[in-house]
Image (cartoon, helix red, strand yellow):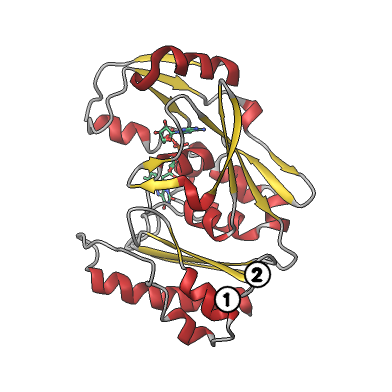
Amino acid sequence: MIPAAFDYARASSLEEALSLLAEHGDEAKLLAGGHSLLPLMKLRLATPSVLVDLGRLEELAYVRDEGEHLAVGALTTHHDLSRNALVRRHLPVLAHVAGQIGDPQVRHRGTIGGSLAHGDAASDLPAVVLALGGTLVAEGRGGRREIEASEFHEGFLETALGPEEVLVEIRLRKPAHTGFGFEKLTKRAQDWAIVGAVAARRDDLPGGVGVALVNMAPVPVRALSVESALAEGVPVPEAAEQADAEADPSADINASVAYRRHLAHVLVRRALEKALS
Ligand SMILES: Cc1cc2nc3c(=O)[nH]c(=O)nc-3n(C[C@H](O)[C@H](O)[C@H](O)COP(=O)(O)OP(=O)(O)OC[C@H]3O[C@@H](n4cnc5c(N)ncnc54)[C@H](O)[C@@H]3O)c2cc1C
């Protein structure tokens, strides 16, 4: 449980973080809240030789109203998301889910950018951002680029970010109707989801709801078949039966594949009933 030796550099600006990444290449890892990276390092599943600490970059911790969307800085903590007045007003699903993550210690250190960039499909916020159709903004020394949430997670702990890029911002459209449902089955309150389901009202979808699943594949899963069924007027209980159509769950100590598929149906139905009530 002791990490391999590493050097530590605290970036005092985004520019400095990008220079440090360019200097150290694949050997470097960004550190945000550290609540996913440090456990991996203690298990020696990650052995970066340099940690570039973003933790003091207040320039990346914000929530801004940009008219049609909210812009959320990648260093915004789960705690701050759960308390932010703009988030609570326009995207209560994000505030609610952020407020349920782990325990207070995890919520005060963990960041939305770290959760997305870590790329663990058992994490909750990636599914929320997917259900909301978010856009992620990455910055490298060559400038900024936008990545759709649906393109961001490429495999287990793999994302579309390049080794010299920093995730700087998450953009989320403000829906006219903010109804949502979030269902998460855990053994203990602070655990990761055995399976989770998010349903969030959206004006830009024909069925009016974005639906995504937690821990039902190596990446967060958008339940497109459910969304299409809703757009065709299929009632919620039948639409929810499509919940696992795009999923590829694994068995583990907590659940078999069949149980995960069953949970997806039940949790999506409950999430939709809440979102549409
Ligand atoms: C006890 C415990 C319980 C937890 N329970 C839950 C839970 O119920 N639900 C849940 O969703 N999560 C849970 N988590 C995970 C928690 O939310 C993490 O904080 C989060 O997933 C990672 O955020 P971080 O800021 O700590 O990232 P870090 O651990 O600092 O970094 C994670 C990874 O992302 C990279 N990274 C970080 N920031 C950036 C960036 N801006 N740009 C590019 N790369 C970046 C790092 O290099 C690293 O590879 C739990 C964690 C713990 C320890």
Specify whether residue 144 is in view.
yes
Type of the residue with mark 2: Gly
Q: Position of residue 56 (x, y in %)?
A: 56, 23
Give the residue drawn at x 21%, y 60%.
252
Q: Is residue 66 left or right of residue 153?
A: right
Q: Which residue is mark 2?
A: 179
- The numbered disc on residue 274 is 1
Query: Looking at this view, is 235 or 108 the one in front?
Result: 235
Q: Secondary structure at mark 2?
A: loop
Position above or below: 127 against 275:
above
Q: Position of residue 84 (x, y in %)?
A: 68, 47
Is there CB contact under 8 Å for labels 2 and 1? yes
Give the residue drawn at x 52%, y 26%.
55
Q: Quadrant of the N terminus?
A: top left
Specify whether residue 99 is in view.
no
Quadrant location, ligand no. 1: top left
Residue 267: quarter of image: bottom left
- The numbered disc on residue 43 is none
